[in-house]
Image (tube, rainbow, N blue to C red):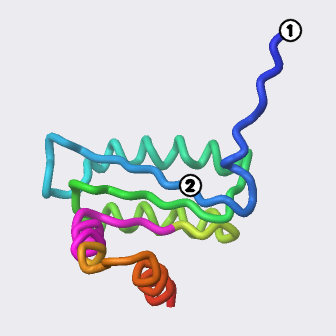
């Protein structure tokens, strides 16, 4: 008999980061049907195990108002989980800001400012 341990990353105190993209629509809104499927997959996981936070990152796509509405519904369905999402513009701003960081103390200060 093989004992399979459940992943510990879906436990309280942990933050899950998941990147998704529609490469055929780069620099355009994420495919809404794909987003619905991904959200349904995440709901199944979050109903079983609840991390402290979940982050959806769409590095090459934008989020239109329909996409944001779907993601906001996910947030309301799981109010105890800190759910955030970022599109390609957010990722681009992050990369540009990180290019200005020259040392570990500067990185720590940047993270502190970003959290406030």
The residue positioned 40% from the left and 83% from the top of the image is 106
For the N terminus, give its image quadrant: top right
Q: Work out whether residue 96 or residue 25 is closer to the camera in this orientation and state it.
A: 96
> Callout 2: helix, strand or loop?
strand
Q: Is residue 94 left or right of residue 28?
A: right
Res 100 quadrant in image: bottom left
Above or below: residue 100 compared with residue 21: below
Question: How many neighbours does mark 1 have within 10 angstroms: few (below 14), some (14-19), or many (20 or more)?
Answer: few
Point out which mark residue 54 bears: none
Point out which mark residue 1 bears: 1
> Callout 1: helix, strand or loop?
loop
Q: Which residues are magenta?
A: 84-96
Q: Work out whether residue 115 or residue 106 is closer to the camera in this orientation and state it.
A: 106
Above or below: residue 114 compared with residue 37: below
The residue positioned 19% from the left and 42% from the top of the image is 23
Above or below: residue 60 compared with residue 86: above
Question: How many neighbours does mark 2 have within 10 angstroms: few (below 14), some (14-19), or many (20 or more)?
Answer: some
Q: Work out whether residue 103 or residue 82 is closer to the camera in this orientation and state it.
A: 103
Q: Is residue 74 left or right of residue 35?
A: right
Residue 96: % across, % down: 22, 74
Calculate the distance from the C-alpha at mark 1 to the C-alpha at mark 2: 30 Å
Residue at which label 2 appears: 16
Q: Residue furthest front?
A: 103
Q: Work out whether residue 9 or residue 38 is closer to the camera in this orientation and state it.
A: 9
Q: Residue furthest right?
A: 1
């Amino acid at each position: 008999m093989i004992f399979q341990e459940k992943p510990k990353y879906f436990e309280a105190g942990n933050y899950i980061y998941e990147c998704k993209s529609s490469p055929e629509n780069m620099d355009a809104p994420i495919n809404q049907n794909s987003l619905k499927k991904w959200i349904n997959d995440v709901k199944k996981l979050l109903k079983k195990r609840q991390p402290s936070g979940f982050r959806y990152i769409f590095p090459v796509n934008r989020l239109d108002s329909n996409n944001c509405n779907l993601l906001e519904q996910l947030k309301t369905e799981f109010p105890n989980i800190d759910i955030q999402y970022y599109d390609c513009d957010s990722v681009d701003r992050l990369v540009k800001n990180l290019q200005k960081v020259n040392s570990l103390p500067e990185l720590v200060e940047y993270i502190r400012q970003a959290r406030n």
